[in-house]
Amino acid sequence: MIQVQIDQRKSEQFAQQMLSVLNHGAISLMVSIGHRTGLFDAMASMPPSPSRQIADRIGLNERYVREWLGAMVTGRIVEYDADRRTYRLPPEHAAFLTRAARPNNMAAICQYFSVLAGVEDRIVECFRNGGGVPYEAFKRFHEVMAEESDQTVVAALDQTILPMVPGLRERLETGIDVLDIGCGSGGALNRMAQLFPKSRFTGYDFCKDAIARAETQAARLGLDNVRFRVKDVARLDDEGPYDLVTAFDAIHDQAAPDKVLSEIARVLRDDGTFLMQDIAASSQLHENMDHPIGPFIYTISTMHCMTVSLAHGGMGLGTAWGRQKAEEMLANAGFTSVRVESLPHDFQNYWFIARKAPQAAQAACDPAYSASGNARIETAPPGASPPSGTDRHRRPARVESGV
Ligand SMILES: C[S@@+](CC[C@H](N)C(=O)[O-])C[C@H]1O[C@@H](n2cnc3c(N)ncnc32)[C@H](O)[C@@H]1O
């Protein structure tokens, strides 16, 4: 029998770590409920108040609210005055928990845990038998995704994202053709259609309910320059050509991301731009050790991004396919120049600005592509991290310096 030596200190530290896992897991679920019920939004504008007042403010059941507050107080999210029996959400915490805190509302992101938990049985089955869980099995996925996208994409399109591509705003104002791949609930495309009435926008997604959400929003906004279609983007047929193709967080979970990238290159005009937002990570596990949301990324991958791809017999790249793999696949698809940017409000993602045109044509419309030579990759400059902000905004050193 093998004698195993136990390092007592290490063992005790790990026990503490597991207690913390237990508590933080529980808090995540309760934070999600705080978001969905509107409790955080209500408490942010209330003075220290008893549970009855908080519940009444938004018409909730007091007994449930009081129990939820117990989790919030012991979880150090809400402050409690034991003498007065009042609860207070400090403004420093509200800044990360309310709808008004967009794009920093982390409570919206906590909703993913219950979305993922809804398919746990099926994922366990996949561990035993392989295969995957398809998109349609995920309850509320498109709703939660739309909220995340609203923070990382929609809110920043006009001022931050589009200006990354020199001359793009001007071209959009004049009138160009835009395609969004895996458009989901269509928030980004509808926003662009609103901002640029002379341009024409097309959104494809293979989920009917996502397209229905997108069309409803377009109708509500009275947009006549945007159309949404249920379509598998691995087969764009004879679509196009387009001046701009976008893919917001929609490549790594494809069944055939290689085909999709080739299709994008094919339907893109020679002087067009492919703008791809995808997860900021390294393709190498050991280089993600200091990633601020490493466990979250691999969890989302196992229980969503990888499995939805495998469900269609796909590559199952996973959420942490990483920058190196992304650059390699973009090059294989025919993109001769790729610039990678990071944005202060969106530490979770890289922004790939890809082109397939000859260097001379690129240089004419974007000085950032002016170097001569063959296919080249430009990287986000080391130290291009956001000037200030919270931990949430700070990208890990390894990612920052270009993996
Ligand atoms: C992570 S979501 C991102 C959605 C949207 N771009 C956003 O930012 O909110 C990925 C989207 O890609 C869609 N998708 C995945 N594979 C697809 C395929 N082969 N054809 C069309 N849509 C696909 C999914 O239905 C989902 O809406």
Image (cartoon, grey):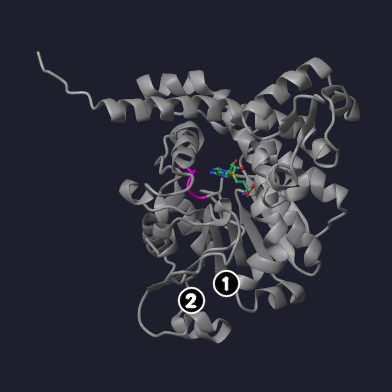
Please tell me whether residue 199 is drawn above or below residue 89 in the rendered image: below
Where residue 6 sits, quadrant-wise, is top left
Can you tell which mark lies on residue 357? 2
In the rendering, at what x and y percent does residue 348 appear? 53, 52
In the rendering, at what x and y percent does residue 45 appear? 85, 42
Please tell me whether residue 288 is drawn above or below residue 352 in the rendered image: above
Instruction: State the quadrant of the C terminus.
Output: bottom left
Q: Residue at x 59, y 63 (%)?
A: 388
Q: Residue at x 50, y 69 (%)?
A: 384
10 Å neighbourhood of mark 1: few (<14), some, or many (≥20)? many
In the visual, does 191 lie left or right of 330? right
In the visual, does 366 lie left or right of 48? left
Instruction: State the quadrant of the N terminus.
Output: top left
- The residue that disc 1 covers is 272
Query: Which amino acid type corresponds to the residue marked 2 in the rendered image?
Result: Ala
Query: Which amino acid type corresponds to the residue marked 1 in the rendered image?
Result: Gly
Q: Quadrant of ligand 1?
A: top right
Please tell me whether residue 211 is drawn above or below residue 330 in the rendered image: above
Q: In the structure shown, which secondary structural element does the residue marked by tag 1 occupy?
A: strand
Residues marked 2 and 1 touching at CB (< 8 Å): yes
Query: Among all residues in the image, which is located at the extreme left?
Result: 1
In the rendering, at what x and y percent does residue 259 appear? 45, 52
Write down the region rendered in magenta.
Answer: 251-255
In the rendering, at what x and y percent does residue 249 appear? 56, 50
In the visual, does 176 lie left or right of 300? right
Q: Is residue 371 shown to the viewer in this render? A: yes
Where residue 39 sits, quadrant-wise, is top right
Where residue 76 sits, quadrant-wise, is top right
Q: Of helix, strand and loop, which mostly describes the magenta segment?
A: loop
Comparing 309 with 296, the one in front is 296
Comparing 88 with 372, the one in front is 88
Q: Is residue 184 shown to the viewer in this render? A: no
